[in-house]
């Protein structure tokens, strides 16, 4: 299912929560933001709305590495022809840049950038003594390396998200935040269950996709 659909569902859940629980502008903003993010988080295991900007950065980085390699080759070739000088250390850097630029897939760079963001969130959680934030950072850092619609689309990931959400509710003292966040994550799995590909809810113990046809 499209990311925009998941985002719309998550936003509706957040708005409903803002209307159901005691209303304040701050709490309403938290409900909607957390709900929308939770509804999209399962798709951190592949290109999605959350990582689309990072995907663009990875493409630009890959192109940058190629051009750096080409530039270094040109400089080294000029130095060798004009001065008969050979610089092995620069040649190695040049080779690595070219290989990394030509061989490395854009997805790998995107995954590394997403994981770096997760690492920064983990560090923030450690500095500010927020265990739930460490858990969130770990989830973000781990998810990009998983197969799409694999572990992030399981009941186990849903339980993990619930634990993270519980810590967030306790820290922020926003009533019902765990329920809102977990329900939004669940909505993503349910929506994907309605698609032809389905969801492997019990992966890796039960590897067949579960599908519901309307």
Image: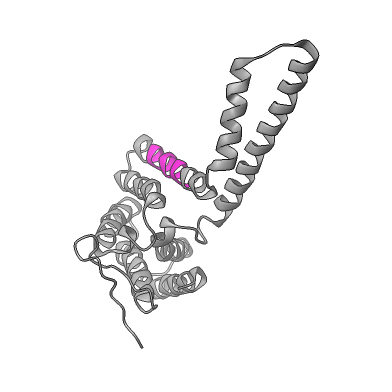
User: 26 and 113: which one is in front?
Assistant: 113
Q: Is residue 20 visible?
A: no
Question: What residue range appears in magenta?
Answer: 114-124
Which residue: 61% across, 52% down? 56
Q: Which residue is the extreme one toward the bottom?
A: 214
Indicate whether 96 appears above or below 129: above
Counting labels gives: 0
| 164 over 179 or under it: above or below | above
Residue 132 position, x and y percent, is 31, 48
- Which residue is rendered at x = 28% and y = 62% of the image? 158
Residue 97 occupies which quadrant of the picture? top right
**Residue 65, image x, y percentages:** 63, 37
Q: Position of residue 147 (x, y in %)?
A: 37, 57
Q: Quadrant of the N terminus?
A: bottom left
For residue 65, side relative to residue 16 (left or right): right
**Residue furthest left as drawn:** 205
């Amino acid at each position: 299912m499209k990311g925009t659909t998941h985002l719309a569902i998550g936003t509706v859940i957040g708005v409903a929560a803002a209307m159901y629980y005691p209303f304040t502008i701050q709490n309403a903003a938290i409900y909607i933001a957390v709900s929308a993010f939770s509804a999209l988080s399962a798709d951190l295991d592949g290109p999605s709305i959350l990582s689309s900007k990072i995907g663009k950065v990875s493409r630009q980085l890959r192109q940058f590495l190629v051009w750096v390699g080409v530039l270094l080759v040109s400089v080294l070739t000029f130095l060798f022809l004009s001065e008969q000088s050979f610089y092995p250390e620069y040649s190695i850097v040049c080779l690595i840049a070219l290989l990394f630029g030509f061989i490395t897939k854009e997805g790998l760079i995107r995954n590394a950038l997403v994981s770096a963001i997760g690492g920064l969130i983990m560090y923030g959680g450690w500095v500010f003594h927020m265990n739930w934030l460490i858990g969130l950072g770990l989830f973000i850092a781990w998810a990009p390396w998983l197969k799409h619609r694999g572990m992030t689309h399981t009941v186990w990931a849903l339980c993990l998200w619930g634990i993270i959400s519980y810590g967030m509710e306790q820290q922020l003292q926003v009533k019902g935040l765990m329920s809102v966040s977990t329900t939004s994550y669940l909505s993503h799995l349910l929506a994907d269950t309605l698609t032809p590909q389905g969801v492997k809810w019990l992966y890796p113990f039960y590897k067949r996709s579960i599908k519901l046809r309307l």
